[in-house]
Amino acid sequence: MLRLIEVVLPKEGVYKNACVFCGLIIENQQVEGLQIVKSVNPPHLLMKSTKTNDYPPLNDTFAARMNAPTYTLTPVKETDFLKGGVLLIDKPLNWTSFDVVNKVRRLLLKKYDKRLKVGHAGTLDPLATGLLVICTGAFTKRINEFQDGEKEYEGTFVIGATRPSYDKETEINETFPVDHIKDEMIQEAKKKFIGEIEQIPPSYSAIKMGGKRAYESAHKGIEVKMSPRIVYIREMEVKRLDSTHIWFRVVCGKGTYIRSLARDFGIALQSGAYLDSLCRTRIGEFRLSQAISMDEAFDLFAVEAGM
């Protein structure tokens, strides 16, 4: 299989006809099946690879990792959100990402008496919790950079049943046997999802189909045919908790649907599965341990604004 891919390197003019690959600078024209075809105004390189399994895929996800934005997180009390900054929030269960953005926008309006541009770098479903990167002011221009960063999640799958939304938003529509599923089978199934895989997004998603969000049709009972996409999973850990619950940790690239991963994992086990819980613990360099809760954000900004 021959692939031609453009890889974006971190700094212009530094690597010239070399590439950064898995943290190493490759200076030869051909190394282990990876060959530089030509340089197009560095830091862009066009490459071809005849190998597909030995290395991470040379796609946009890889380029994003190599060109990951750096940002030194400033303590919330020292950040001038009016000029622009980053606020890390631990999103509560049942809140939409927009709920968080809207609440932060209102808090900052109280603090600065001025309406600020506020956005987030990567949606979390209402039934998910964890890291939400909020950008304000000039930093909203960096949202695309931040959301291209590698993601890390933890959560649980339930095996032996499926739901149309692939999570607990909808009711169970089918059940399956689980007696045949042994721990060894679970560990073997995991291996099928490491690397570059094809994935079909849930019909209950915000992907636009024919000018409308897919979930709008799905909620009305209209069948939505979702197109498969290529995503990348760098690491995956799984551990059986009981007869029907499996804990997982996943490190993946942009565009990966963990709900779809749950569904596909069930199929790999010759059963069914859906996403029971999900927490995002990292986006690029940002970690959940650095985030504050919405209650902490409210208390902090309310005090500063004299509320």
Image (cartoon, rainbow, N blue to C red):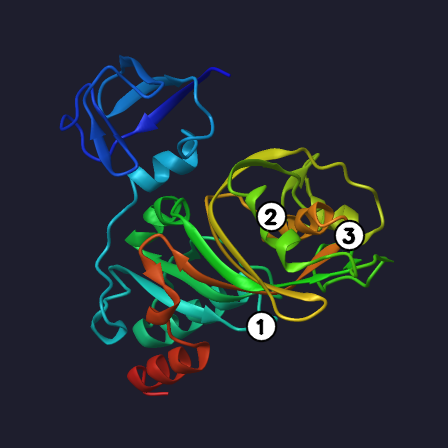
Q: Disc 3 marks which residue?
A: 271
* Crowd band around label 2 with a 10 angstrom C-alpha radius: few (<14), some (14–19), many (20+): few
* Crowd band around label 1 with a 10 angstrom C-alpha radius: few (<14), some (14–19), many (20+): some
Would you identify the image quadrant in which residue 209 lies?
Answer: top right
Amino acid type at mark 1: Leu
**What's the CA distance linking mark 1 and mark 3?**
28 Å
Q: Disc 2 marks which residue?
A: 188
Residue closest to the eye, 116 or 283: 283
* Helix, strand or loop status at disc 1: loop
**What's the CA distance linking mark 1 and mark 2?**
32 Å
**Residue 235 versus residue 100 in the image, above or below:** above
Mark 2 and mark 3 lie on one chain; the one further toward the N terminus is 2
Q: Disc 1 marks which residue?
A: 93
Residue closest to the eye, 214 or 187: 187
**Residue 81 versus residue 60 in the image, above or below:** below
* Crowd band around label 3 with a 10 angstrom C-alpha radius: few (<14), some (14–19), many (20+): many
Q: Is residue 173 left or right of residue 300?
A: right
* Helix, strand or loop status at disc 3: loop
> From the viewer's perspective, is the residue at label 1 or at label 2 nearer?
2
> From the viewer's perspective, is the residue at label 1 or at label 3 nearer?
3
Q: Is residue 275 left or right of residue 220?
A: left
> From the viewer's perspective, is the residue at label 2 or at label 3 nearer?
2
Mark 1 and mark 3 lie on one chain; the one further toward the N terminus is 1
Would you identify the image quadrant in which residue 113 lies?
Answer: bottom left
Amino acid type at mark 2: Glu
Instruction: Estimate the x, y position of residue 112 in percent, counting from the top left.
Output: 30, 72
